[in-house]
Image (spheres, coloured by chain):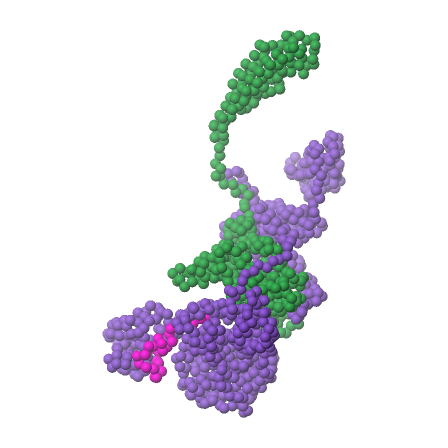
Chain colours: A green, B purple
Amino acid sequence: MSAPNKSFDPVEVEALKPEAVERALDEALAALAAAADLGALHEAEIAHAKDRSPLALANREIGALPPAAKAEAGKRVGQARAAVARAVAERRTVLEAERDARVLVEESVDVTLPWDRAPRGGRHPLTTLAERVGEVFSALGWEVTEGPEVEAEWMNFDALNISRDHPARSPQDTFFVRTPGVDPNDPTHTERDSLILRTQTSPVQIRTMLKRQPPLHMVCIGRTFRTDALDATHTPVFNQIEGLVVDEGIGMADLKGTLDHFVKAMFGAGLATRLRPNYFPFTEPSAELDLQCFVCHGASVGDPDHPCRTCSSEGWIELGGCGVVNPRVLVSAGIDPERYSGFAFGIGLERTLMFRHGIADMHDIVEGDIRFTLPFGVEI
Amino acid sequence: MRVPLSWLREYVDLPEGLTGRELAERLIPAGFEVETVHESGAGLTGPLVVGQVLEIEELTGFKKPIRYCQVQVGPEPADVRGIVCGARNFAVGDKIVAALPGAVLPGDFKIAARSTYDHVSDGMICSARELGLGEDHSGIIVLPTDVQVGADAIELLGIRDAVLDIAVTTDRGYCLSMRGMAREAAIVYGRTLRDPALLDVPAPTQGGYPVVLADPLGCDRFVARAVRGIDPLATSPLWLQRRIQLAGMRPISLIVDITNYVMLEIGQPLHAYDLGRLTGTITVRRAEAGEKLTTLDDAERALDPDDLLITDESGPIGLAGVMGGASTEVHAGTVDVLIEAAHFDPGSISRTARRHKLQSEASRRFERSVDPNAAAAAAQRAVDLLVLLGYGTAAPEVTVASTRPHAAAPIVIDAGLPGRVAGLAYPRETVVRRLQEVGCTVEGADRLSVTPPSWRPDLTDPNDLAEEVIRLEGYDRIPMRLPVAPRGRGLTLRQRLHRRVGHALADAGYVEVLNYPFVGDAEFDAMGVPADDARRDALALVNPISDEQPYLRTTLLPGLFATLRRNVGRGMTDVALFETGLVYQPRPGASAPPRLSVAHRPSDEELAVLEAALPDQPRHVAAVLTGARENAGWWGAGREATWADAVEAARTVAAACNAELTVDQAQYEPWHPGRCAVLSLDERIVGYAGELHPKVLEALGLPPRTCAMELNLDVLVPASEVPVTAELVSGFPLASVDVALVVSQEVPAADVESALVAGAGPLLEAIRLFDVYEGERIEQGTKSLAFALRLRAQDRTLKADEVAAVREAAVASATRHTGAVLRG
Ligand SMILES: [Zn+2]
């Protein structure tokens, strides 16, 4: 910027002469009109409308004029610059419209082209189901617990009122870990117990009770082992959902309410559950939990023309066992049965998964074929 | 237990027209799992009548001998039909079963008059199989002489029946009998039971067959009754055969059928000895070492000192409660028998049955407890039937050897207990009535003194009595109530972390699998695991699923390798798998777990001893990958998975745990010796990652360049508990400098980087290795590593000379520690 110069004659400031301003304006408008695309417009704008343009430079000289001349010169230059700015905007509108109509069309691609550059992963549905079950009970304020898979017999059997002669305690049903000095085929002749692979998640009940006094509200979802051969509905390595509540005044009504809540969370509302008397050493009374068949809702019973594969036309599906904790179990775990009572349940996770997702064959769950697992994604 | 409805009706007046399915619907809520209801004779309609053969004309000239019979099928003289028959086991005068035209036999076999063998056959003479009464097709049914000609044979033979197959729970041994099931049916329908064990039984006498109970705990009662002069030609009547058959057993001979029939009826297993084959006093005792016994199935069995035996002076003559011996077996010529009705210890019987893999109808019942007070009645019932059907004579002597009376102790319960257990109040009268219905004696007002019946040894605790009341009142009547838990703390950090790890790996393209935890030597061998490696020190199973995989895994890799191979074998070329799960590491010197009491809580010391016997069971995470990590496509080339992806998978897991792993070069099986990273956290080894050894891949049948990683997740958990301290974010400008350093090839990049970091000091904001060059432009045996350093101060804009000083210091440190030379 030039410094103010009082002795300077304003008429002598060439750039502010009306002809000069008019010439600059004409040149600017011609250049803008000639801009063929947005790039050329941008250049023309820099040349004629921005800080280095003749009109902008002329504008700077106004300060050098004596006060009387400032107003007129300012108005002249200002009008010219406004006209240029308008012309820029008009030309931009035209050119943008042209670009939108032609150039973007030319740039279009096939967005249906596949993009599987990074292969997708997925979680096993048993894991995601286990997590979901854990959340259902966690939301009720229950503790989600865990325990060892290789267990001592006492935790898996004795403490649960399963006597030494119980058939489930033999190597026909239970995996025995080689343990020095113990012959599992001859339980009468040894002083010490064997290590085993837990046959149920119930030892986690015992561990929870040994650790703390009631009130106890816990669920454990974990791996269990029995010597079944792998077939369409059995696997030697499977998962159980174990629940336990011990508190004052707990009865079968609490068990029924809890199971109903769980079934609704897993299978949706509108399906009946029923408890059927059964026998387990660790609960008394004991019951089998049946869920109304969600495929036929019981309509297939006695209707040989419309058999149901899911429930074998029985109308009900066995989900697991449950009952009131046998007071003997409370005693083994150091809980006063006169004051406290409880309920427990054990439900097969694989069965729940098979029913919930229509899986016909256990092999699919066990084999780890990615074609089975991937469609489940990361949540179910 | 198979329960024929017609047989049940003998003891309970069930409603007229009751169907098997209706009965099942009532028994299921009472605790009896009815597996099937078999409608016997459902596919059969008459006319099916008793006929008498009047004449037989033998037809010859056919491929086999054929008979043309004149059969009287009704009371009128005109009711005679000509029927062609291929069987030969009958004579003129025999009474037979004739299906007349219009009848339909099982299998939709319609009977009509038809021409055959040059005669018109006006009906059919039936065999047992044709009527669905069994498998016997050796000849036609010959009926007893006293049946009425023309009578309805469907009725007579009991062809139409419903049989309920009931899975009796192990605590309800009494329901392995018609007597027990009839009691339950009577309760359900509110009718009276006619108890078949309520018989007139003569008192024990002197002079009966001598019996000694040498093991009073194993056998506390032994009733012996003799019946002499049985007609060896006498056979079981049809009704008896039919009932045994419907109950799922096979008719064999009159004597055996009677013992089975009484067992089915009363629940007391019986054994019949050929009296003439017994030698002296019967002693019930444990086996002695080295003793042997040939059982009824002709198997010679080496006996265990825990086996309870029936012996006479010749030696063992039976495995008590499980199976009789061959030497004293009844046979076709037996005329004198000794009936045994004994009571054995359930545990002993179950051990013997398991030990010898001999599950018999008798052992099944003894294992689940048999009513000790029904032994005498059962023996009497057998004697009565042998006299009635076998024309024998009952010996007047009655042997009852008994070591203790069977009187159950009363259980005292509060009348409100069943209501509290259920969560539903029952009136006192209901509680008392239900307990009486199952056979208990009940005394008292609010405190009830309840004495269970002799057939219910399972009723020992107050809750057992509560269950009887609750199940008979119906589980369906119990209301629903959701218990209120105290405020919870949600998932533990460890649980949340396990989830995060799973999600992180899935998001990174890995597919989760859950493998069986069984491994074998062959897998360790293929992995090149040395003989003295800790991973070989695995727990072994006594009874593995497969002898090839007797161990419990100490590493997740073998399972992942097998699953990867399966996927590749099924045509998948680009596979990335992961698993998280427990591995099992025996503790050195651990002893077997102690036997602890169940009468009270074990002490903390006892529990500590138990815990010490368990193996360590840390949770591991492992991954394997092969094929493309990035697919080729229209965007360009893909990228094969490399060792770096495996190390990155480990870093992904660590990042999910807020932990940063230190990576060092390592050599560890089954990895490639030059492409294996050991990953550690605070000097502790967490795991390994890299490309697998080519020899291992070949041995495992996996594609070349397959990569893997495995980490101990438990080590990472505590790391995530350390809270992150926030960095102060500087607003001053950034100064970037690059350095290229030439180092010897074997110097790890990580060492150069940490030396640069140490030398650069606090002004270093970040450092990143952005290029590695090996080639002609530098000396052979060296590599050039190019790092970008981002420098920034907290309190000022860095000046050019400060930046230069930091760069110089960083390079100097790298030179000092790794011999790095600034690349010109
Ligand atoms: Zn159904």
Asked whether residue B150 is drawn in magenta, I would say yes
Percent coordinates x, y for residue A255 in the rendering: 56, 62
Which quadrant, please, contains the N terminus of chain A?
A: top right
* Relative to B699, B66 lies left or right: left
Q: Where does residue A22 sit, x and y in percent of width and height? A: 56, 12
Name the one closer to the observer, B594 or A370: B594
Q: Position of residue A9 (x, y in %)?
A: 66, 7
Up-down relation of residue A123 to residue B276 (above or below): above
Q: Is residue B342 left or right of residue B91?
A: right
Figure check: B100 above or below A213 = below
Instruction: Tell me which residue sits at (58%, 63%) in the image.
Output: A344
- Residue at 59% x, 59% y is B483
* The one of B273 and A82 positioned closer to us in this rendering: A82
In the rendered structure, the answer to whether residue B738 lies left or right of residue B151 reads: right
Quadrant in which residue B44 is drawn: bottom left
The answer to whether any part of residue B699 appears in the image is: no
Q: Where is A150 relative to B811, above or below?
A: below
Q: Which quadrant of the structure image shows residue B11?
A: bottom left
Q: What residue span does the magenta drawing correspond to?
A: B138-165
Q: Position of residue B521 (x, y in %)?
A: 60, 60
> In the image, what residue occupies the spot 35% across and 80% down?
B142
Number of marks in picture = 0
- Residue at 49 percent across and 39 percent down: it is A113
Q: In the orientation shown, which residue stands out farthest toward the bottom? A: B207
- Can see residue A42? yes
Q: Main secondary structure of the magenta part?
A: loop
Of residues B299 and A16, which is closer to you in this image? A16
| The stretch drawn in magenta includes residue B152 | yes
